[in-house]
Amino acid sequence: MKKISGLILIGLFMIACCSAAIAAKPKASVVKPDPVVQSQQKEDLSDFKDDMNSALSDLKGQIDKVKSDNNDAKVGGVIFFNFQNYLQNAGANLNGFNVERAYVDFKKKLDGGAAVRVTLDVARISTALDAAKTSQQLYNFLKYAYVELPILDNSTIGITGKLGLQQTVWIDWADKILNLRYIVKSLVDNEGVMSSADFGVGAAGKLKVGTMPDVEYQATYLNGSGYKNAEADNKKNFGLRLNSNLLDFADNGKLILGVWGQAIGMTNDLLTGTTKQTGALLAFKHSLGTVYGEYLYGTGISGYSVGAVCQLMQKWNAFVRMDNYDPNRDKANDQLDRSFYGVTYDWNKDVKLALDVQNVAGGSAAATSAGKATSIIFLHSMIAY
């Protein structure tokens, strides 16, 4: 009992000491904020937020401007790669792999509806240093470099001007009919009747007359020397193409007609002494295939081409084409007969493959390997990017 009482007394003593110590400790003073300082701090914070928001807004505006400036810029191209093996009259070149062409294409829309295009072409050509023409290295050069300028667009006529190195009136349009450029050029291009591009000025657009089908046109006034050569005289070429979908059956296909003409070597006397050429193409295009016929006639020359592409099954197509070209109607036995046939396979939308045979007979010695018939089997491919 005494022990318990002692413990109680000791506990009470300790509590009393602690209470005294707490009571003796000075209380912490409370500092009230200065209203002026507090107001200044709030104002500084508000200014900082405003400056930050303004900077972020300016940065976003600059980023959006860069995006907008380059939103209409497109870079692409295509590669034509092939393997060939001679079946007849090979000469020294039995077979081989080759990059026939490689294009790098830059397109950009400009202010006011204008647009610019620059296309680099890579092909196997001889240089001035290779007089024997044995090197045949791959070189890059300009194929297109032009600007398009909208001039007029109303319910009756549309006019877009072109300045620079541009397409001639026929080849680019005709190649799109059969869509087999990676296998074989169109008749006019394949026989060297017209260059595919040249330096000068042009105009393109549509004509709308009442209920008649719309007519597309392209007119050019060019050097005439082609994109591979600089102008060497004061002569110029004038060309014109008109084309239209004569009949459009919606899902059942459309009938297309195109006609063209050009005057070669125009001077101050306009058409006097010029070489004149004209041609036409009629095609029926359907989702299951295309059939077409093309005719060419000009000063001293004539020719025709007929062909068809038909769908065999999904991604697979078969094609056939027959060409005849007479480079000089006043000369006997110089006509060229060409045939092309094979199958194509669309690996995907960017890669196409073809297995085809190309034959040529007749013509001069320069055209057909010592004047004899030549036959070649190809594996063609087109890679778009």
Image (cartoon, rainbow, N blue to C red):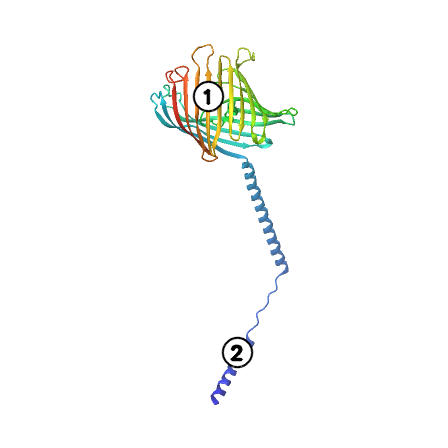
Q: Is residue 83 left or right of residue 74?
A: left
The alpha-carbon separation of the residues under discs 2 and 1 comes to 117 Å
Kind of residue at disc 2: Cys
Q: Nearer the viewer, residue 196 or 382?
A: 382
| Residue 169 x %, y % | 53, 22
Q: Residue at x 63, y 60 (%)?
A: 35
Give the secondary structure at mark 1: strand
| Coordinates of residue 264 in the picture (x, y in percent) | 52, 15
Please name the amino acid that badge 1 sits on: Met
* Residue 66 % position (x, y): 54, 39
Comes first in the chain, label 2 or label 1: 2
Q: Which residue is drawn at the image coordinates 46% and 17% (left, top)?
A: 325
Q: Which residue is mark 2?
A: 18
Left or right, residue 79 beside residue 212: left
In the depicted structure, whether residue 167 falls above or below residue 328:
below
Residue 195 appears in the rendering: no
Location of residue 321 in the rendering, given as x and y in whole percent from the top left corner? 46, 23
- Label 1 packing within 10 angstroms: few (<14), some (14-19), many (20+): some
Query: Which residue ends up furthest to the bottom in the rendered image?
Result: 1
Q: Which residue is mark 1?
A: 322
Please state which of residues 321 and 149 is positioned toward the viewer in this rendering: 321
Is residue 283 visible in the rendered image? The answer is: yes
Label number found at residue 135: none
